[in-house]
Image (cartoon, rainbow, N blue to C red):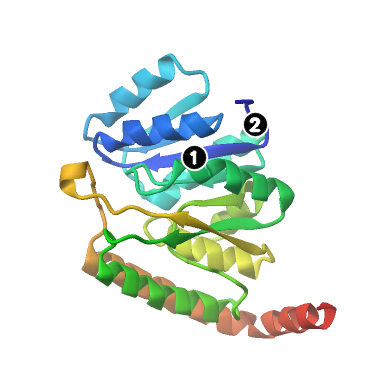
Amino acid sequence: MTASSTHVVIIPSYNPGSKVFETVRDARQYWNPVWVIIDGSTDGTAAGLQALAVDDPGLRVVHLPRNQGKGAAVLHGFQLAAEAGYTHALTMDSDGQHPADRIPAFMAESTRQPQAMILGVPVFDASAPSLRVKGRQVSNWWANLETLWAGIGDSLFGFRVYPIAPLCKVMQRQPWMRHFDFDPEAAVRLCWSGVKPVNLPARVRYLSADEGGVSHFRYLRDNVLLTWMHTRLFIGFVLRLPMLLMRRASQLFRA
């Protein structure tokens, strides 16, 4: 496997349990380089990840001293990647839900369409909690309304490839997107800035505790966060509506 000089895999990690080691090994099997951003973990996995990196030049581990949130960890990783000369990054969760074997296909599509963001659309199996599946349909509807149906296949699935510069620019302009609100808000705001969404399917696994699954999703807390996120995005949508309508009319005219 040849190391990429443009595309890097970034895995934010916060108290993921032992499943993170399998996740990182699987990602390294399919891509070089892979960076893990440890977001203030206290479960002992930081030491194990750093030990893996000692013998693997394709693996870089960055340890943040305190938990800042998924979006903040991703932004830190993206800024480091930009400084190192990378132009694109694939993000994936550390808990084993995302399919490492899809990394090459997503990176290849990003190489073909470097101005786009490559969004994973989850293919669920029987392990998916129905409440989570139905809940994301609500978020997806709002995300598509807020972008005038620009083509966001799934707003919440964190397995995706971003062009680094546009995402950093969007995040540096405002204080949001630092926690669980990162994935949907990133997709909407990048659409607003003219980054085209391209959708590719990817299976998702919901692991039980016996399988090593660890979830930090809190139904009330995180749904309140998403509600506030869509409230501010809707306000931003209304303010941008003339621009979005003009862009959509231009796209229809060219078609």
Report the side of 222 relative to 106 (left or right). Answer: left
Which residue is the site of mark 2?
4
Q: Nearer the viewer, residue 11 or 137?
A: 137
Compare residues 154 and 82 and report the one nearer the observer: 154
Q: Which mark is residue 78?
A: none
Residue 40 appears in the figure: yes
Three-letter amino acid code of the residue under disc 1: Ile
Q: Residue at x 67, y 62 (%)?
A: 195
Mark 2 Cα shell of 10 Å, populated few (<14), some (14-19), many (≥20)? few
Looking at the rendered structure, the secondary structure element under dot 1 is strand
Marks 1 and 2 in Cβ contact (< 8 Å): no
Q: Is residue 53 above or below residue 244?
A: above
At label 1, counting other C-alpha atoms closer than 10 Å, the crowd grade (few under 14, some 14-19, many 20 or more) is many
Give the x, y percent position of residue 95. 32, 44
Horizontal and vertical percent position of residue 193: 66, 66
| Horizontal arrangement in the rendering, residue 245 relative to residue 37 (left or right) | right
How many angstroms separate mark 1 from mark 2 (CA)? 13 Å
Residue 10: mark: 1
Residue at image position (57%, 50%) is 161
Considering only vertical position in the picture, is 34 above or below 79?
A: above
Q: Is residue 8 above or below residue 129?
A: above
Residue furthest out toward the top:
55
